[in-house]
Amino acid sequence: MRDMNEVLEELQEKIGYRFKDKNLLRQALTHSSFANEQKINKLKNYERLEFLGDAVLELVSSEFLFNENPDMPEGQLTKLRASMVCEPALAYCAKDIDIGSYILLGKGEEATGGRKRDSITSDVMEAIIGAIFLDGGLENAKKHIYRFILSDLEHKILFLDSKTILQEEIQKKKDAKLRYELVGESGPEHDKQFHVEAYLNDALIGAGVGRTKKAAEQQAAYEALLKMQVNKKK
């Protein structure tokens, strides 16, 4: 196991924020399975920080959308905010800073692929926001959210809503039919990867791999959309 001080140092460098109280960052990275294994010096897990971070994220993202979309009605703002801060969206952002590699997991959770699980990485993203808020106040938490969650939104929304957006694009074409085909599975039972291909009629337009069939379909749809964007520019 890596030295915890090195882990914390590396992550602080990556996110561009230095904690006055590094124990807050350590807590934000500690899954309950790891905390429960520590019989002596039992550690706090990230769940309370996640609760706080979720509230801070909702406030900051609400203010951002309110200011960025002055003519958008409340219903649309709510829907857009929900898509930006949902579990898949936060897990996608977590991949940018490789959050999974820093989490403290118990042996059982580690063995069953918890380091790559969206539900865990998204929770840790919120816990880090909560930790920064407690350590450095709202402005520092806001800077972190703007940098890692509210940046490049157009690209992120394209990825998160890829299946819906692709379906809408296909519906514009006459006699066009979209289908997804599961073409293979790989990996052990606890860490299975599904391989899916997307077809427009009989033409292969995208391929994806994911930990669920739905995630693989989303990846395939995203690849298809990127190809369509390239073709439109030609």
Image: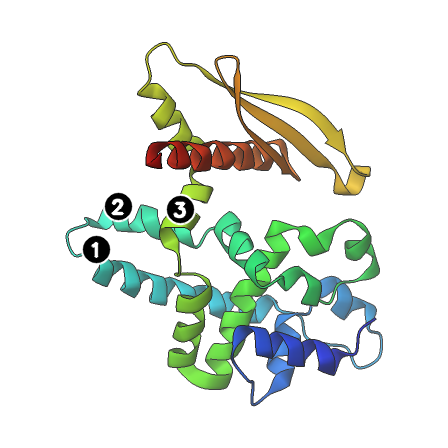
Say the numbered circle drawn on residue 157. 3
Q: Amino acid at mark 3?
A: Ile
Q: Is residue 75 left or right of residue 123?
A: left
Residue marked by disc 1: 69
Does label 3 or label 1 sit earlier along the sequence?
1
Residue 31 visible in the snapshot: no
Q: Position of residue 110 (x, y in %)?
A: 79, 56
Q: Quadrant of residue 7?
A: bottom right
> Which secondary structure, mark 1?
loop
Q: Tell me if mark 2 has few (under 14), some (14-19) or many (20+) residues whose alpha carbon lies within 10 angstroms of its own.
A: few
Q: Residue furthest front?
A: 234
Q: Is residue 108 left or right of residue 142?
A: right
Residue marked by disc 2: 76
Relative to 149, say whether 89 is above or below.
Answer: above
Residue 43 visible in the snapshot: yes
For the point 38% across and 54% down, which residue is it? 153
Does label 2 or label 1 sit earlier along the sequence?
1
Q: Position of residue 175 (x, y in %)?
A: 37, 9
Q: Residue furthest top?
A: 175
Q: Amino acid at mark 2?
A: Gln
Relative to 99, say whether 183 is above or below.
Answer: above
Q: Tell me if mark 1 has few (under 14), some (14-19) or many (20+) residues whose alpha carbon lies within 10 angstroms of its own.
A: few
